[in-house]
Amino acid sequence: MHGIGGHTIAEAQRQLTYGEFLIWMRYRDKRGSLNTGLRVERGAALLATLYANSKSKNGGYQLYDFAPHHDAPVMTLERAMEEWA
């Protein structure tokens, strides 16, 4: 929440209503982080992944190979479908 509207975290906590907080949480769930640096890193990592996979014979690169500040999911969708089916 730091930096929203030019406020510190403490100021934002005092001024932000619970309803507004829920709206911001839905926004973050849909659109991702509010941190500009992380958004740029993710975009650059996506481009690097696409480029590396186009030049690789096996195409095994993932977005998280190029985004050091993003954590890879604990389980992939494919693995979850195999284990839970």
Image: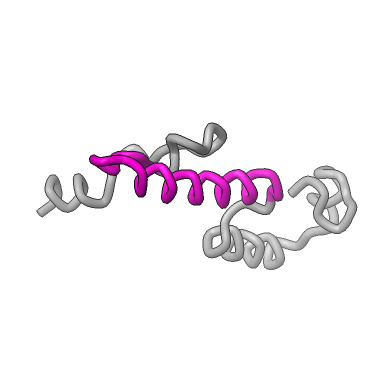
- Confirm whether the magenta stretch covers residue 36: yes
Horizontal arrangement in the rendering, residue 44 relative to residue 11 (left or right): left
In the picture, the quarter occupied by the C terminus is bottom left
- Dominant SS type (magenta): helix
Residue 76, quarter of the rendered image: top left
Residue 52, quarter of the rendered image: top left
Residue at the far left in the pictured view = 85
Point 63% across, 45% down: residue: 38
Residue 17, quarter of the rendered image: bottom right
The total number of labels drawn is 0
Q: Is residue 19 above or below residue 85?
A: below
Q: State the image coordinates of residue 30 (x, y, percent, origin top left).
A: 53, 64
Horizontal arrangement in the rendering, residue 80 relative to residue 12 (left or right): left
Residue in the foreground of this view, choosing between 77 and 23: 77
Q: Is residue 3 above or below residue 56?
A: below
Point 57% across, 56% down: residue: 32
- Confirm whether the magenta stretch covers residue 63: no
Q: State the image coordinates of residue 36 (x, y, percent, origin top left).
A: 71, 50
Residue in the foreground of this view, choosing between 36 and 50: 50
Q: State the image coordinates of residue 26 (x, y, percent, origin top left).
A: 57, 64
Residue in the foreground of this view, choosing between 78 and 61: 61
Q: How is the image coloured?
A: one colour
Q: Is residue 50 above or below residue 72?
A: below
Q: State the image coordinates of residue 31 (x, y, percent, origin top left).
A: 57, 62
Horizontal arrangement in the rendering, residue 65 relative to residue 39 (left or right): left
Point 89% across, 53% down: residue: 6
Residue at the far top in the pictured view = 68
Point 34% across, 37% down: residue: 74
Q: Which residues are magenta?
A: 35-62
